[in-house]
Amino acid sequence: MDIGRATSFLSRNPRAVLATIRKDGRPQLSPVVAAVDDDGRILISTRETAVKAKNLARDPRASLCVLNDRFFGEWVQAEGDGELIHLPEALPLLEDYYRRISGEHPDWDDYRAAMNREKRLIIRIAIDRAGPDVSG
């Protein structure tokens, strides 16, 4: 599948399951809400203490299964290396992520305070492979 087609699908369908790799090599799966930035990279907000963040710090390989609202039908798998962007550098990206998912926040100062209090970071994934290329 063309990566542009995959990012277009993800822009319209933000619900996904992120797979990262545990220390023992088994997958760790997390339901996430994902956005796509202007450069076609996937953005995901999480906490510093989340297992997915710890897994990506150790092994950056990430896979995302993106589902449509009906669950059945079209879906996309996107793969790439996850980059962890920590506060304070993450704050503009967290704001951009929020806008892409939900629009404008009613109180940006409150949002920024919550991001700091929750020790949020951004996972940014540059897609290097997407699929499926066939169905059936």
Image (cartoon, rainbow, N blue to C red):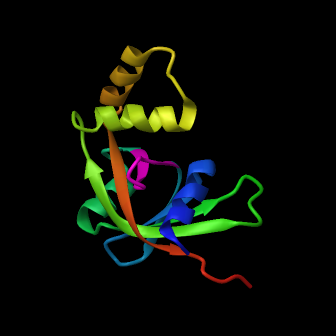
Residue drawn at 54 percent across, 28 percent down = 103
Closer-to-camera residue (21/45):
45
Relative horizontal placement of residue 116, taking residue 64 as reference (left or right): left
Q: Nearer the viewer, residue 88 or 127?
A: 127
In the image, residue 18 lies at what x, y percent? Answer: 49, 61
Residue 101 left/right relative to 91: right
73 above or below 36?
A: below
Nearest to the observer: residue 113 or residue 130: 130
Image coords of residue 8 (percent x, y): 57, 56
Q: Quadrant of residue 70?
A: bottom right
Q: Is residue 71 visible?
A: yes
Q: Can you say whether 110 is above or below 93 in the image?
A: above
Residue 41, picture quadrant: bottom left
Percent coordinates x, y for residue 123 in the rendering: 35, 51
Q: Is residue 55 above or below residue 24?
A: above
Is residue 76 on the magenta stretch?
no
